[in-house]
Image (cartoon, helix red, strand yellow):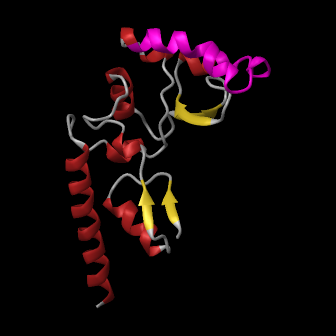
Amino acid sequence: PVLAAGGIMDGRGIVAALALGAQAAVMGTAFLTCLESGIPQAWKTRVRSMSDTSTSVTRAITGRHARGIRNPLMQRLSESAQKVAPYPVQNALTQELRQTASRAGNSDYLSLWSGQGAPLGRKRQEGLGAAELVGQLEQEWQAAAAQIAALKR
């Protein structure tokens, strides 16, 4: 099976992935701000307010490449990229700082992992549960699929 992932945030994205031959769409960032998400509130707030140019790929925080919202932690550690230890050493070196920032609600020193598609989910209300989001996504992809089917007639 082919699974599509990356930048899929709504029903239109699901329909597009299926139209291109995928059997399923894998969504991650779309669920970050759900009630059940274990990420700190400061991270959820940053995801909701980011633009499509707010992210970068870095290995500076954990030693592994990952996409996240740029913040002072990412910027400062990236300035000395040659000094970044490999994973899991770098992850361990930054762990206490990230945990302290989490407890303090300080998004400047969290690892704010997020895909570039987050702004596409901005129209969703705060406090949405995962089950409600899945229901909305189902309605959206069915509506988008119906529109496409109507065009083919």
Q: How many marks?
A: 0
At x 48%, y 42%, the residue is 115
Q: Position of residue 106 (x, y in %)?
A: 41, 12
Would you say 136 lies left or right of 40 here? left
At x 32%, y 61%, the residue is 11
Q: Position of residue 73 (x, y in %)?
A: 56, 16
Magenta-drawn stretch contains 93? yes
The quadrant where residue 87 appears: top right
Q: Which residue is farthest bottom?
A: 153
**Residue 101 higher or lower than 50, as above or below:** above
Q: Is the stretch drawn in magenta largely helix, strand or loop? A: helix
Residue 120 appears in the picture as rendered = yes
Would you say 99 lies left or right of 39 here? right
**Residue 84 higher or lower than 44, as above or below:** above
**Residue 81 higher or lower than 120, as above or below:** above
Residue 78 appears in the picture as rendered = no
Q: Position of residue 63 (x, y in %)?
A: 68, 27
At x 28%, y 38%, the residue is 34
- Name the one closer to the observer, 105 or 144: 105
Would you say 101 lies left or right of 149 here? right
Quarter of the figure that contains the C terminus: bottom left
Q: Position of residue 13 (x, y in %)?
A: 39, 61
- Name the one closer to the observer, 151 or 60: 60
The quadrant where residue 88 appears: top right
Q: Which residue is farthest right?
A: 82
| Magenta highlight range | 76-102
- Name the one closer to the observer, 69 or 93: 93
Magenta-drawn stretch contains 118? no
At x 43%, y 65%, the residue is 24
